[in-house]
Image (cartoon, coloured by chain):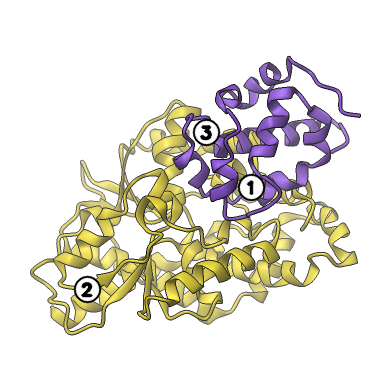
Amino acid sequence: MALVNPDFAAELQAYGVDTALECFNCGTCAAICPLNYEHFPRKMIRYIQVGAKQQILQQAQDLWRCLHCGLCTRTCPRQANPGELILGLRRYVVAQSRRGEHV
Amino acid sequence: MFKPTDIIDLLAANVRQTRNPFGVPASRFNTWWRDAGGSTRRPGDALLFTGLMYQAIPFIEATTRYLERLEDSPWAEHLRWGRLVPASLRGLGLDYLTAAAEKKKFNGILQTICRVLKKSQVGFFYHPEMDFYSGILLYDLGDQEGFLRHARFVARTLKLHGVQKIITVDPHTTYALKELYPKYTGESFEVTPYFTLLHLAKEGGGNGQPPVVLHDPCFYGRYLKLAEGPRQVLRSLGLEYVEVRNCGEFTSCCGGPAESVSPALSREILERRAAELQAAAAPVVTFCPICLANLLKAGLPVEDLASLVGRTVNNGG
């Protein structure tokens, strides 16, 4: 069972993740993403919104599939900046890993 | 796919020890300038800053060939122990595995850039001690701490040398210096990609070269919106080019950025882009060392913008 944490989005702001709540989950980012992979990056943004921290840590490896090509950010109708959110999540996961948290 | 944090720790250890992610002291692979004719610093001149990207491509390719064999094998697990080997030893091993012909080819691109800048009468100088890796890979992979430490060192060193104007040769370094350094180090420079400074109209005339198809790197096409610059250079030389549907701001990724964590994924993205470019049935021209190396892997006839410009100027001048 996934635990949700409404304060998680605020916790991520220290890693540059500050536009996640702009996203209304339209899926444009997942449609244009060259990875064409399991609703990426939309899925990760939804996890941020509901505070599903464990889901992000369990699927952390997927964050590094992102090519940082910027197509999602260029086409996002809400300027939620999905590419930068993924980059911010990488920073968060790297920081967690260095603190010894299991990733 | 490798465990990303293993790769990041290895690269971060290299950057800490040798100031570049390859673990090879820059003096060993940054040698292109020895055959570039030299340039003297004058007041107001810009620093030519390669970011060590073109000269590093043969090393990146050698690394990727070995990573490709390890990926998803039982040996992939052991990669994390690589950081315990001193960077100098890792680097020497890599240096040994890198073909001299490849080094010469990529050094030649930098020498050509130098030559066409001189022909365009651009005031610039080069000093290998002031040319650093930008740290962009650490930033892209999410090692913010490592990126900040390195970027602050580079920015501070350049400021200490009184550098204000910088000429860049690749999109990743351009993005780092133009967008990331002011934001994260507080230091700003006047950053200009070399192709926007070229004035070669009277030198060439196309010389009957066949049309080329352009592959825009993501960072020039989309992030920095500089796709028009190389087109302007080609038009001024009378060189024809054709566009593919996914170009400029909507260019497709070549797959290069995935190389360090998953050569297999990189290959998959590359094959898709290669098919788009092949449909144009023309030689490919790009202006990023990562894209160039990756597209070459797909077996496409591809060359760097600088090589095409240099050859045209030679024939016409």
The residue beneath circle 1 is B15
- What kind of residue is marked 2? Glu
Same chain shared by disc 1 and disc 2: yes
- What kind of residue is marked 3? Asn
Chain letter for mark 2, please: B
Residue depicted at 25% across the width and 52% down the height:
B124
Crowd tier of the residue under label 1, counting other residues whose Cα lies within 10 Å: few below 14, some 14–19, many 20 or above: many
Residue depicted at 41% across the width and 59% down the height:
B246
Q: Is residue A87 left or right of residue B112?
A: right
Give the spatial CA distance, label 1 vs label 2.
41 Å
Q: Quadrant of residue B117?
A: bottom left
Q: Quadrant of residue A49?
A: top right
Give the spatial CA distance, label 3 vs label 2.
36 Å
Label 2 residue SS? loop
Q: Is residue B134 left or right of residue B88?
A: left
Task: State if disc 2 and disc 1 touch (CB < 8 Å).
Answer: no
Chain drawn in purple: A
Which tint was used for chain B? yellow
Same chain shared by disc 1 and disc 3: no
The residue beneath circle 2 is B240
Give the spatial CA distance, label 1 vs label 3.
29 Å
Which numbered disc flags the more N-terminal residue, 1 or 2? 1
Q: Is residue B40 visible?
A: no
